[in-house]
Amino acid sequence: MVERRTTVNHAMKTARGAWNTMSLANSGLFAPKNPFEKMGLRSTSRETPNATFAELTAFQAKAFEIGYPSLTTGVLIGWELLQRKAHIFIRFMADHYRPGSRPNHVYVINYKTSTGSWEPLFDKKGNPLYPQLTAELDATQRLREGKNEWGRSPPLGVEQWSNKLAKLSG
């Protein structure tokens, strides 16, 4: 079993804060000493390893090979726009990429605040900032415009995409 130290620490800090807030508001219902204080929480100083572009392209090649071309675009969105899988596969809409009102922009969601902003796809000289991503999304958009609907299959949820990602990286 993989230890999720950051998740554990966050949960305990949240419990400590909740206890403090509730005990102040309801002093007669809570013991005066917070059981979540001074827990001796530890964290690791291990740096999270970053993927290389070569690893990204190898992953994309494998995904394409086994029949998941949209997944190759999804991981490229994550790579270029620093998006989490939920924002890529659930919240990212066709209207977020080069809509008529903003033909040179993409709507990017900040994963910490869940707020978004329109980001440029081209520099001031008209050169693409994300050439591979722009080419893939343009091709996807052309395919979708040729159809009257998004497709006959319902969209996959986060869990289904997570399973696909696990199979590819496994």
Image (tube, rainbow, N blue to C red):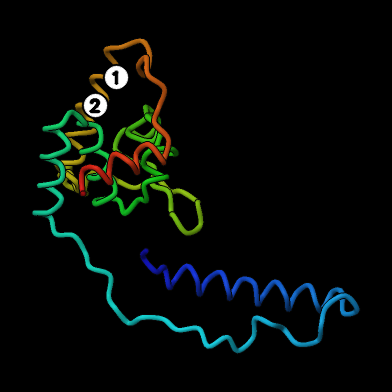
Q: Nearer the viewer, residue 67 or 105?
A: 67
Image quarter where the N terminus lies is bottom left
Q: What residue would you read off at disc 2?
A: 140
**Residue 34 vertical position relative to residue 14 in the rendered view, above or below:** below
The amino acid sitting under disc 1 is: Arg
- Give the residue at x 72% y 83%: 34
Q: In the rendered image, which quarter is residue 152 located in?
A: top left
Q: Residues within 10 Å of mark 2 (few under 14, many from 20)?
A: some
Q: Position of residue 54 (x, y in %)?
A: 8, 54
Q: What residue would you read off at disc 1?
A: 144
In the picture provided, is 155 more to the left or to the right than 166? right
| Distance Cα–Cα, label 1 vs label 2 | 6 Å
Q: Position of residue 74 (x, y in %)?
A: 27, 40
In the picture provided, is 28 more to the left or to the right than 161? right
State if disc 2 and disc 1 touch (CB < 8 Å).
yes
The amino acid sitting under disc 2 is: Thr
In the current view of this chain or complex, which residue is farthest to the top? 148
In the picture provided, is 133 more to the left or to the right than 156? left
Q: Nearer the viewer, residue 166 or 50?
A: 166
Which element is circle 2 on?
helix
- Give the residue at x 80% y 77%: 23
Number of numbered discs visible in the structure rendering: 2
